[in-house]
Image (cartoon, helix red, strand yellow):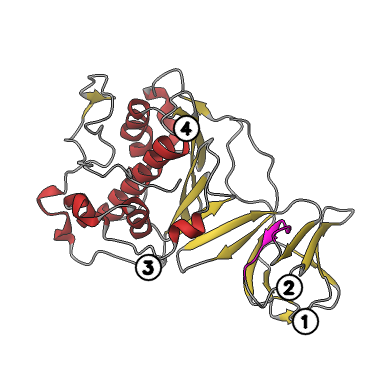
Amino acid sequence: MRRPEPMPYFEIQLTPKLQRVYDIVPDTVIGRGPQCQIQLLSRAVSRRHARVEFGDQGEAIISDLGTKNGIKLNGQRIQGAAVIGEGDVLVVGDVSMVFRAAGRLSVAADALDFRDRPPAREDLPRALMAQASFLIRADAGQIATFQQTIARARIERLEFDETTRFKLQIALKEALDNARAHGSRGDRARTICVTFSEDPEEFLMQVKDEGPGYDFEQRLAGAVEVDALEAIRNRPALGAGLGLRIILNCIDRLQFEGRGAAITMGKFKEGGQIFVISDESDLGATGDADPMAITSDDEDDGAGEVFGLPQPGPFLDEDSEDGPLRLR
């Protein structure tokens, strides 16, 4: 998987937890029309509403294309054109969007490649870096080994409570299962990239596959989150499309890029947890369930220990044919 060049982008908030990302290329047109590079389906947005170009110094410039409802930049309506910078909030018609210069997660140039070898003990220091990327095959056994070793080591070092760390593991499992079963369509030769990133405010996990993506806004219509711990106990009774609802309960924001071939899951460190489990007994007798364990339909190489640590029992995943997170 080739490392993409960083580029500026817009974040559009669809729900309190869900964001969509649009990359900005030279001469990007924003509007309601299907020919626009960024299409905003709102009656307050004109068919061709705005254009984003780059100046001689690389600065981003947004121009109003003579519309009735105009553009607001940080609360002030612009006249003609204006330079926009990191974190600026624009309202195009009635759609709010945040400009990001180029800070989105990308595949690190020195990504560790596990496609042809299993993780080793000497790989653990890389997993604990502020940002690290890993390449794995879309293979159930490889994914399970990665989760049991590298991902577990990274998440367990986070300064969250035990329940929050457990739910982050669940969210990562759901995203990886989706990338394997639906993004890669079961093709074990395809690559999945996982990136972990941490700063003083937030911990991020990105899962990116080589699939064509999907119309996620239609797929997500009406999706309601479900308590992740309850879902572990009673998954078959909660219906199809459950994986997405689980992920929404486990994180504070979910960001989709392009047509959904990459998702980024974020957990805020201070004051950002929107949904909490108030009763620690929620873990109950199934608190030792392991969201990273190999399931019944996975391939197990027979290793009962990873880096000398005994592995807990399997994470029961008796799902319908829709799979753990059907987003394709």
Amino acid residing under circle 2: Ser
Residue with the mark numbered 4:
126
Please give the residue where the numbered disc 3 appears in the rendered image.
274
- Mark 3 to mark 1: distance in Å? 37 Å
Please tell me whether residue 294 belongs to the stretch shown in magenta.
no
User: Which one is closest to the eye, mark 4 or mark 2?
Assistant: 2
Spatial separation of the CA atoms under disc 2 and disc 3: 34 Å
Q: Amino acid at mark 3?
A: Ile
Q: Quadrant of the N terminus?
A: top right
Q: Are marks 1 and 2 in contact (CB under 8 Å)?
A: yes
* Residue 68 - label: 1
User: Does residue 60 appear in this view?
Assistant: no
Seen at 90% across and 53% down, the residue is 56
For marks 1 and 4, give the one nearer the viewer. Answer: 1
Query: Callout 2: helix, strand or loop?
Result: loop
Mark 1 and mark 4 lie on one chain; the one further toward the N terminus is 1
Quarter of the rendering containing residue 247: bottom left
